[in-house]
Amino acid sequence: MPNSPRAAAQPPPSPEPLRVPVADSHTHLDMQDTTVEEAVARAASVGVDTLVQVGCDLERSRWAAETAAAHASVHAAVALHPNEAPRLEAEGGPGALDAALDGIAELAALPQVLAVGETGLDHFRTGDEGRAAQQRSFRAHIELAKRLGKALVIHDRDAHADVLRVLAEEGAPERTVFHCYSGDAEMAEVCASHGWFMSFAGNVTFKNAQPLRDALAVAPPELVLVETDAPFLTPSPYRGRPNAPYLVPVTLRAMAEVKGMTEDALAEHVAANTARAFGY
Ligand SMILES: [Zn+2]
Ligand SMILES: [Zn+2]
């Protein structure tokens, strides 16, 4: 029944392996339907040899740190997601947000935790009433990344101008990554001028994503990363089916086409860039 919803939701097949291994710079294994062992092994079988596991609240950040400690090829990033911070403050007041931030600070100091994030601003899911808490949390995460010398992973949804403003006001950490980069070519020039990394996800393959491909086209190869943000943003032609780190090659190949580079040349850049961005 190839057209049944069940068939449509089945995991896509494994792509042809990459010859030059790269990292999935941003994934959420805790939201995927497989064990960590299965996800790591399947990714490795297609040349995705390193994963950055991102926690979105205190509990899942703790899980990310534990998972990274248990698997040599998995690194952790910890934070309160931009939509989690306002939720905490709405439910428990500013004290609840502060307590969670203290917990994140403790986890961020662990050696297997290479980044603080994903943090930033999300004007799509958080309304006006949550903006102040979201911004306060973003500023606290920036300060933490700088204090600990860790990378900063930014989530920016419909909030480009405000994200750039807060970064300018606080001063960005030495290593800053825009995860699921969603700006246009003009913003890519701004990121490039600061040496900020731009991590592209499966949506760069979507038909309606020409502005994103225009941004990728002008992004310096030295600052480009690839990610799945799995289980979200499954690349074409598998939209609607579950995403996982083993699908990185599908996105990387589409990116190489946009850059007019060979798959191997782009993969070499991406592998080196990700190691530099996260410091492993
Ligand atoms: Zn995000
Ligand atoms: Zn994410």
Image: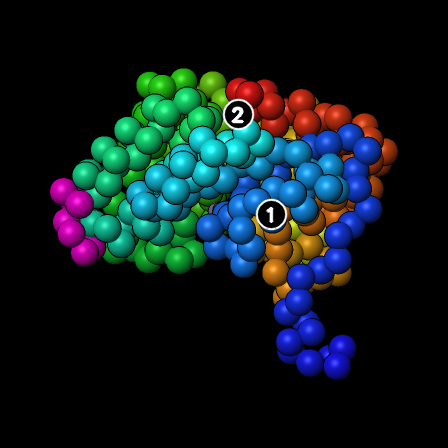
Colour pattern of the rendering: rainbow
Residue 124 sits above or below residue 117 on the image: below
The answer to whether the residues at label 1 and label 2 have Cβ atoms under 8 Å apart is no
Q: Tell me the tag on residue 39.
A: 1
Residues shaded magenta: 90-96
Instruction: Name the amino acid, label 2.
Output: Phe
The quadrant of the image that shows the C terminus is top right
Q: Residue at x 53, y 51 (%)?
A: 35
**In what element is the residue under mark 1?**
helix
Q: Which residue is drawn at 66% across and 67% down?
A: 10
Q: Which residue is drawn at 65% across and 43% down?
A: 41
The spot of residue 119 in percent (x, y) is: 40, 39
Would you name the residue on which mark 2 appears?
278
Asked whether 248 or 48 is in front, the reply is 48
Residue 256 sits above or below residue 109 on the image: below
- Give the distance between the C-alpha atoms of the residues marked 1 and 2, in whole angstroms: 21 Å
